[in-house]
């Protein structure tokens, strides 16, 4: 067997001892019979090393995750070579833990599914290299996975949802609205023109020094904002939602972030404190920021629902909006979206928070979906590469903008 060398994509033959150590970590059950297809999913596209074994019926047999959040919080953001090194240090253990918990041996797997796009090049490379070694060692089919497709279809593991459905993906790296028409059939209705909402919330949390706040020190930026916002009054600040005159489904967060930065600077002056200390108005700012993000996301999503309804792209009687990605675990933003779905007679569905953030289960499940649909299953992995940039589906955002749908005002009383 091959295991990773120091440089991504370069392998070396490990010692016999290492091979036995790795294989020795699995429990083999000779008498066991699996009736369903079993997929091992591996995720390393950003800053979480995750793996899971999921069966065809959607049962999660075993999962494991190593989060790098705490390390990156200390350095003020993700440093790709650091993320790569941490993936290298953890991937073998995480895969082994997921397999051991599932009581499935690698030889019993139907396929190995791994995120290959989009994401950080150095991070994707670790997952892909490791997976290809397993594929080669155990002679299994390989299923390359699109990270955003996996987020989008996670809901079909937890709920009975038929295609087509509208999906809003909001995370640290992505922000998009798409119509899911099939396992690998998506129409892109809109996306962020600059940064993603999670990225913005992370930056604001950093600027507010929430890492020094005793209640938030180990939380991601978005989670820290949500936590602190509960103690604040959003009415003390008035940030305008971006792009109010653009009648499309695109998003923007960097302008808003600069406005907030300026406001924080002004408040620091007023309160006579240095940058690096926590403002007394931090909770009020967090509440106002969260509210503005929620209003912006809700408005764009409202327009996407109206566009899909106008074009007959969703089920007439049972239109579904799925919201996923790390930011979707924010309950305030979910409530804003609920106001929109109630007003448009749609059903709002969100995976449970642990399946909204990056995880191995969604990758394994996407492998199951592809296996069932017979889509993208590779028996020869020659030439397979990771792709740091990769759009989701067919981009019809221009057509959405040309429709210039006016969205009725909704009272955002959350
Ligand atoms: O999906 P995810 O784990 O990774 C990406 O693919 O980006 O999302 C991580 C992002 C981070 O920016 C984090 O601050 C944000 O999701 N996040 C939240 C919450 N929990 C995580 N944002 C708002 N509210 C939360 N509760
Ligand atoms: Zn993600």
Image (cartoon, helix red, strand yellow):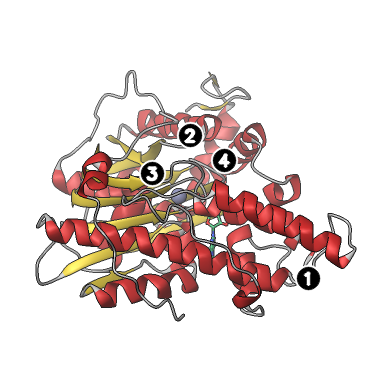
Task: Mark 4 or mark 3: name the one nearer the start of the chain.
Answer: 4
Nearer mark to the viewer, of 4 and 3? 3
- Between 398 and 23, the one nearer to me in the picture: 398
56 left or right of 200? left
Nearer mark to the viewer, of 1 and 2? 1
Give the alpha-carbon distance from disc 1 to disc 3, as whole Å: 33 Å
Nearer mark to the viewer, of 4 and 1? 1
Nearer mark to the viewer, of 2 and 4? 2
Task: Mark 4 or mark 1: name the one nearer the start of the chain.
Answer: 4
Give the alpha-carbon distance from disc 2 to disc 4, as whole Å: 25 Å
Task: Mark 1 or mark 2: name the one nearer the start of the chain.
Answer: 2
Task: Determine the secondary structure under disc 1.
Answer: loop
Task: Mark 1 or mark 3: name the one nearer the start of the chain.
Answer: 3
Q: In which quarter of the image is residue 341?
A: bottom left
Instruction: Say which residue label 2 marks.
Output: 124
Task: Determine the secondary structure under disc 2.
Answer: helix
Give the alpha-carbon distance from disc 4 to disc 3, as whole Å: 31 Å
87 left or right of 28? right
Instruction: Say which residue label 1 marks.
Output: 214
Contact (Cβ within 8 Å) of mark 2 with mark 4: no
Contact (Cβ within 8 Å) of mark 2 with mark 3: no
Instruction: Say which residue label 4 marks.
Output: 21
Instruction: Say which residue label 3 marks.
Output: 147
Give the alpha-carbon distance from disc 1 to disc 2, as whole Å: 34 Å
Does 267 sit above or below residue 358?
below
Give the numbered dot on residue 149: none
Q: Where is residue 281 in the image (x, y as percent from the top left)?
A: 75, 71
Q: Where is residue 164 in the image (x, y as percent from the top left)?
A: 16, 56
């Amino acid at each position: 067997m091959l295991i990773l060398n120091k440089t991504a994509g370069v392998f070396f033959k490990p010692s016999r001892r290492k091979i036995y150590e790795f294989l020795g970590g699995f429990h083999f059950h000779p008498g066991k019979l699996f009736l369903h297809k079993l997929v091992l999913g591996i995720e390393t596209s950003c800053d979480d090393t995750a793996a899971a074994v999921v069966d065809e019926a959607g049962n999660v047999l075993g999962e494991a995750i190593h989060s790098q959040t705490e390390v990156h919080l200390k350095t003020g953001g993700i440093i790709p070579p650091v993320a790569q090194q941490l993936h290298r240090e953890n991937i073998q253990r995480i895969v082994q833990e997921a397999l051991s918990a599932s009581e499935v041996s690698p030889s019993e797997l139907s396929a190995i599914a791994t995120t290959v796009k989009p994401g950080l090049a150095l991070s994707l490379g670790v997952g892909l290299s490791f997976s290809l070694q397993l594929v080669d060692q155990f002679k299994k089919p390989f299923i390359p996975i699109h990270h955003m497709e996996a987020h989008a279809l996670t809901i079909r593991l937890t709920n009975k949802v038929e295609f087509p459905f509208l999906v809003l993906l909001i995370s640290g790296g992505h922000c998009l609205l798409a119509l899911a028409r099939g396992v690998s059939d998506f129409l892109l209705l809109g996306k962020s023109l600059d940064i993603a909402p999670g990225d913005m919330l992370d930056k604001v949390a950093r600027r507010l020094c929430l890492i020094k706040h005793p209640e938030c020190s180990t939380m991601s930026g978005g989670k820290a904002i949500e936590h602190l916002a509960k103690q604040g009054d959003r009415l003390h600040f008035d940030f305008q939602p971006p792009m109010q005159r653009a009648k499309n489904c695109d998003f923007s967060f960097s302008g808003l972030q600069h406005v907030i930065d300026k406001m924080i600077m002004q408040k620091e002056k007023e309160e006579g404190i240095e940058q690096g200390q926590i403002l007394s108005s931090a909770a009020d700012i967090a509440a106002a920021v969260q509210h503005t993000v929620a209003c912006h996301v809700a408005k764009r999503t409202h327009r996407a629902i109206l566009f899909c309804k106008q074009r007959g792209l969703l089920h007439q009687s049972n239109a579904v909006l799925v919201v996923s990605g790390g930011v979707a675990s924010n309950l305030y933003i979910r409530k804003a979206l609920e106001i929109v779905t109630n007003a448009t007679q749609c059903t709002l569905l969100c995976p449970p928070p642990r399946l909204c953030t990056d995880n191995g289960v969604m990758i394994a499940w996407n492998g199951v979906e592809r296996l069932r649909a017979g889509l993208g299953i590779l028996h020869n992995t020659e030439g397979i590469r990771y792709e740091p940039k990769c759009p989701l589906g067919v981009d019809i955002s221009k057509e959405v903008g040309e429709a210039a749908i006016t969205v009725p005002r909704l009272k955002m009383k959350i």
